[in-house]
Amino acid sequence: MFRYIFPGALLILMIMMLTGCASNSVDTPLNEGQSLEIGVIGDAPAIRERNISFTEMSFDDLKEGSVFPNTVDAVFIGKDYLSEAAEPEYAQVYKNAGVPFFFIESMKSYIPFVYKDLSYEEVLDMQSGTYITGYYQSGGKMQYWGYGLYNDKVNSVNIKDAYSRIFATIASLSP
């Protein structure tokens, strides 16, 4: 009798484990199109794409504006630099640079970065499930994006998926 119950129970357990694993991550197609050069303040992310290059940047580079838009297609600003990125002197940079900015792990949306009167700490956290916030302004047209993680699970597969979606967005903005 146990001989017939045990294999069935083992099969059910294996299906439950596989279903549980599948619900924690998603693996979407790679962005294998246009090559992109991304400026990074902070650490460059681990990604799946081979056609993406990263250039280390500083806030002084943002102030000078010499890197836009001829040398980078977008700028990523890491979690540890968000408070500094929201300082009033950078608000006009984000609006006039002509490239999109992505604020990694910002819980504040794009608001503290483009409004001079608000500090990063003053803006309430958004409960939207957004892992990365993007902002782009070209002329009078402004766009912003929120990139979440599959099932709000922080793991390397889901994070790499978010970056793949960001690369597709950046490529769609290029002429």
Image (cartoon, rainbow, N blue to C red):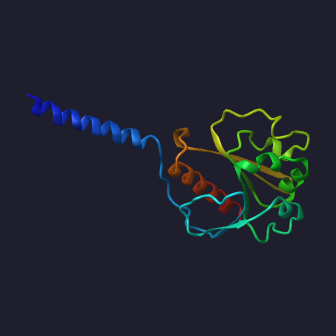
Res 94 visible? yes
Residue farthest toward the top in the current orientation of the protein: 1
The quadrant in which the C terminus is found is bottom right
Q: Residue at x 56, y 69 (%)?
A: 50
Res 134 visible? no
Residue 164 or residue 33, whichever sits in front: 164
**The image quarter in which residue 126 lies:** top right
Task: Say whether residue 36 is left or right of residue 97.
Answer: left
The quadrant in which the N terminus is found is top left
Residue 12 in percent (x, y) is at 26, 35
**The image quarter in which residue 97 lies:** bottom right
Q: Residue at x 77, y 47 (%)?
A: 82
Asked if 57 appears above or below 20 in the picture, the reply is below
Q: How many marks?
A: 0
Q: Residue at x 83, y 59 (%)?
A: 59
Residue 28 in percent (x, y) is at 50, 54
Q: Residue at x 83, y 34 (%)?
A: 122
Asked if 117 appears above or below 56 in the picture, the reply is above
Residue 133 in percent (x, y) is at 70, 47
Asked if 112 appears above or below 55 in the picture, the reply is above
Residue farthest toward the left in the current orientation of the protein: 1
